[in-house]
Image: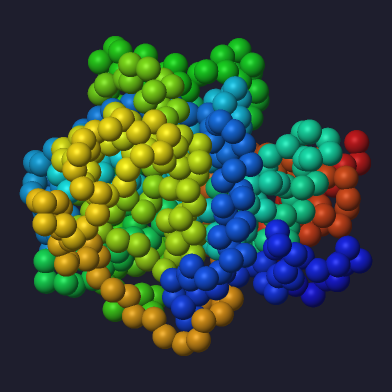
Amino acid sequence: MSEQFDNTAGPLTTESGAPISNNNQSEAAGVGGPLLVQDQVLLEKLAHFNRERIPERVVHARGAGAYGTFTVTADVTKYTRADFLSQVGKETETFLRFSTVAGNLGAADAVRDPRGFALKFYTEDGNYDLVGNNTPVFFIRDAIKFPDFIHTQKRDPYSGSQEADNVWDFWGLSPESTHQVTWLFGDRGIPASYRHMDGFGSHTYQWVNEAGEQFWVKYHFKTDQGIKTLTSEEADVLAGADPDSHQRDLRESIERGEFPSWTVQVQIMPAAEAASYRFNPFDLTKVWLNADYPRITIGKLELNRNPENIFAEVEQSIFSPAHFVPGIGPSPDKMLQGRLFAYGDAHRYRVGANADHLPVNRPHATEARNGNRDGYYYDGRHGGQKNYEPNSFGGPNETGRPLWAPVQVNGPTGEWETPKHAEDNDFVQAGYLYNLMTEPEKERLIANLAGFIAKVSREDIAQRAIANFARADEDYGKRLTVAVAELRAK
């Protein structure tokens, strides 16, 4: 950014008062490498952020869930050794929690907000959690900015309300958000129900097969009910008339025996192709083009059982992208790397150190065996078993076989920006998305964006926001400029 800002308040610091040199990039093991535990700024921000609210979730507080079954429909053993994907026809019990992001526990369902799509597979090798959204991208690409982003979506510390100034100030100064904002303010920004939306793993993950060959993978869950959305006007009415609309729809559809389902697809990239792909394949603000890596159908997800108790099974359910199984692992995606720490830390704080022992969270097809004991709500399940390893009293032993394959890193540690590939910028894919829309879809997108931007009190914030959309597509920017000007003139 070339703009200069008033910095008379002094340098940004950690909680202990140490000046922060870089608040925009996490410290990584070389350019494009995984993040480092020694990055105290990142860990302090994420740990403090996870403790800002009690007892509801800081984000994704408003949710609904159901149990179901995942069934393999295609052979993927040449890509991964994950046992639950090992043969066609194999079934695995699942639990899926849907949610909005910004609203609190008492908020309405029918609002313009991304939807969480958090899926737990109760596999024979332990639980595998896939934590995603109903969009394939996100607003930011580095976990160090996540607390800052969410603060703009929550209530202002002075006014107590969500402020358009805060939202658009951050988005305008974070041009990588342009792609996700275009998704959010388009027609799919307000799903008609949880059943009528797609889901995405969003992040890039690693698959590794029995031979040790590595692949990068993205998950897609395509709704079999068809996409249905609400206009802003329809959502305003529904949110007031029935704040629980999405939760009610999901529960009642399962009660009627109309089990919602999704066709599960993946995009697969051989690991060697990542370095030369035209977009950085680990940048969460980007998609892999289907023309480059076509989606492959691998399974079917069906929801067929409602929880008996919402608090015990939906509110106390926990998900962490760090819950992997053999054959599946992380990627150098900086947002994913941060979430590997932040999700588990949030649950240990919010639900407790023994959250994994609760029925909805514990493994269903195997059992957990380790030395972790005691803490709040510990149920004494281990009896007199030894709580250390190795031991000679028949305790569990390490396998010596990593769940996933190692990733090559190089270069000095540092607070590096996410590497750019040949066609990477913050706007090109937002432009692609805009030009995929029909004319009526574009008109609604412009109206939705303009209505929100027009609420901004400062002209420079509004113009900076509009400029990002203009860089995505000239027509996009021109139409938005006119629409905002007309609304601000009233």
Image coordinates for residue 187, horizontal then vertical, percent: 55, 38
Q: Residue at x 25, y 23 (%)?
A: 304
Q: Residue at x 15, y 62 (%)?
A: 399
Question: Can see residue 8?
Answer: yes
The residue lying toward the viewer, choosing from 356 and 472, is: 356
Q: Residue at x 31, y 30 (%)?
A: 379
Q: Residue at x 32, y 43 (%)?
A: 373
Image coordinates for residue 182, horizontal then vertical, percent: 60, 50
Note whether 103 is above or below 325 in the view shown: above
The residue lying furthest to the bottom in this view is: 411
| Apparent side of residue 389 relative to residue 174 in the rendered image (left or right) | left
Image coordinates for residue 440, horizontal then vertical, percent: 59, 40
Question: Would you identify the image quadrant in which residue 266 lies?
Answer: bottom left
| Apparent side of residue 257 relative to residue 318 in the rendered image (left or right) | left
Image coordinates for residue 167, horizontal then vertical, percent: 72, 47
Note whether 118 is above or below 469 in the view shown: above
Note whether 237 is above or below 93 in the view shown: above
| Apparent side of residue 62 relative to residue 448 in the rendered image (left or right) | left
Question: Can see residue 230?
Answer: no
Question: Would you identify the image quadrant in which residue 33 lies?
Answer: bottom left
Note whether 312 is above or below 43 in the view shown: above
- The C terminus, quarter of image: top right
